[in-house]
Image (tube, rainbow, N blue to C red):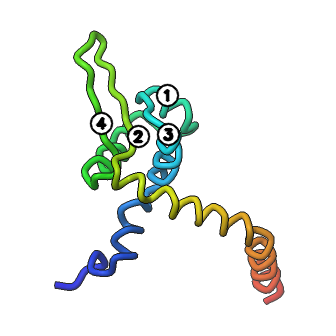
């Protein structure tokens, strides 16, 4: 059976394509964060969604979760060495987006104008 995961690029995109995953990785590139710190940093994410996204990133080996035996329990998240290898790729993507933002906006505007003119 052929799946999109047979293509390395598609597998990677599938791994990080959920709405919050790239943002979580970008927040964690600054260092270890507690769950509530991530919640505050990611305005608009729900606790349920953040928990789910973190668990998927952990399952894929990109994020490590450390639980401290305290009351209340303290949970910290950080990028794994594998997760750290995505940081330069995401940095390059951010640079590309900034460098081409005007072109992208112009293309979108031209497309919308063309659709409106039909």
Of marks 2 and 1, which one's residue comes earlier in the chain? Answer: 1
The reply, left or right, for residue 18 in relation to residue 56 is right
Instruction: Give the residue drawn at x 43%, y 57%.
Output: 18
What residue is disc 4 on? 65
Instruction: Give the residue drawn at x 81%, y 76%.
Output: 106
Tell me: residue 33, above or below residue 9.
above
Q: Where on the picture, by quarter, is residue 11?
A: bottom left
> Residue 54 shows which numbered tag?
none
Of marks 1 and 4, which one's residue comes earlier in the chain? Answer: 1
Whole-percent x and y of residue 52?
Answer: 33, 44
Which SS class for mark 1? Answer: helix
Query: Looking at the image, how many numbered discs can be counted on the residues?
Result: 4
Q: Which residue lies furthest to the top in this view?
A: 71
Name the one closer to the observer, 84 or 38: 84
Name the one closer to the observer, 21 or 87: 87
Q: Tell us which disc is closer to us: 4 or 2.
A: 4
Tag 3 near tag 2, CB within 8 Å: yes
């Amino acid at each position: 059976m052929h799946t999109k995961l047979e293509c390395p690029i598609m597998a990677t995109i599938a791994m990080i394509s959920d709405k919050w995953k790239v943002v979580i990785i970008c927040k964690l590139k600054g260092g270890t964060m507690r769950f509530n710190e991530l919640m505050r940093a990611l305005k608009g994410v729900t606790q349920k969604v953040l928990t789910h996204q973190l668990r998927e990133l952990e399952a894929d080996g990109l994020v490590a979760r450390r639980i401290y035996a305290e009351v209340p329990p303290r949970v910290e998240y950080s990028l794994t060495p594998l997760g750290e290898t995505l940081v330069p790729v995401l940095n390059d993507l951010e640079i590309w987006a900034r460098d081409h933002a005007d072109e992208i906006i112009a293309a979108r505007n031209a497309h919308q104008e063309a659709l409106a003119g039909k």
